[in-house]
Amino acid sequence: MDKEKNRLYLNMFFGTIGIVLVGVGALKYQVVMNDIEGYIIAYAGFILTAGYINYLEKSWNKQ
């Protein structure tokens, strides 16, 4: 059981790093393209996705 939890936490860690990298990539793209609408849409989607993943992680930890 302890090994399974360690694997879960490792996957959660890499998932969080992935979200951060997507956000940084979107920021870099927006700086290069200088598009305000795209900036707002990308970060709204990023925030909603991060919130949803946070919710999933909390509901998984309650089990």
Image (cartoon, rainbow, N blue to C red):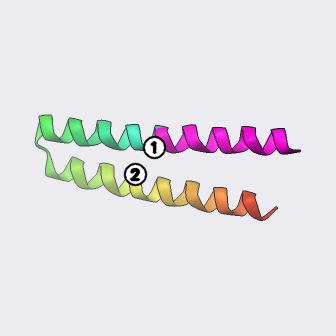
Q: Residue at x 41, y 57 (%)?
A: 47
Tell whether 21 sits left or right of 6: left
Question: Residue 14: x percent and y percent?
Answer: 56, 37
> Residue 46: which numbered mark, if any?
2
Tell whether 23 sits left or right of 13: left
Query: What predominant SS class does the magenta segment belong to?
Result: helix
Question: Residue 51: x percent and y percent?
Answer: 50, 60
Indicate whether residue 33 is drawn in magenta: no
Q: Residues within 10 Å of mark 2 (few under 14, many from 20)?
A: some
In this view, the residue farthest toward the front is 2
Q: Please say if the residues under marks 1 and 2 sit with CB atoms less than 8 Å apart.
A: yes
Indicate whether residue 12 is drawn in magenta: yes
Q: Residue at x 22, y 50 (%)?
A: 39
The region drawn magenta spans 1-17
In terms of secondary structure, where does tag 2 sit? helix
> Which residue is denoted by mark 1 in the rendering?
19
In this view, the residue farthest toward the left is 34
Q: Nearer the viewer, residue 51 or 7?
A: 7
In this view, the residue farthest toward the right is 1
Depth check, mark 1 against mark 2: the one in front is 1
Q: Residue at x 65, y 56 (%)?
A: 57
Q: Quadrant of residue 29?
A: top left
In terms of secondary structure, where does tag 1 sit? helix
Question: Residue 12: x percent and y percent?
Answer: 62, 44
On the rendered image, what quadrant is the C terminus found in?
A: bottom right
Looking at the image, tell me whether mark 1 or mark 2 is earlier in sequence order: 1
Tell whether 28 sits left or right of 59: left
Tell whether 4 sits left or right of 29: right
Q: Quadrant of residue 1?
A: top right
Type of the residue with mark 2: Phe
Question: Residue 21: x percent and y percent?
Answer: 39, 37
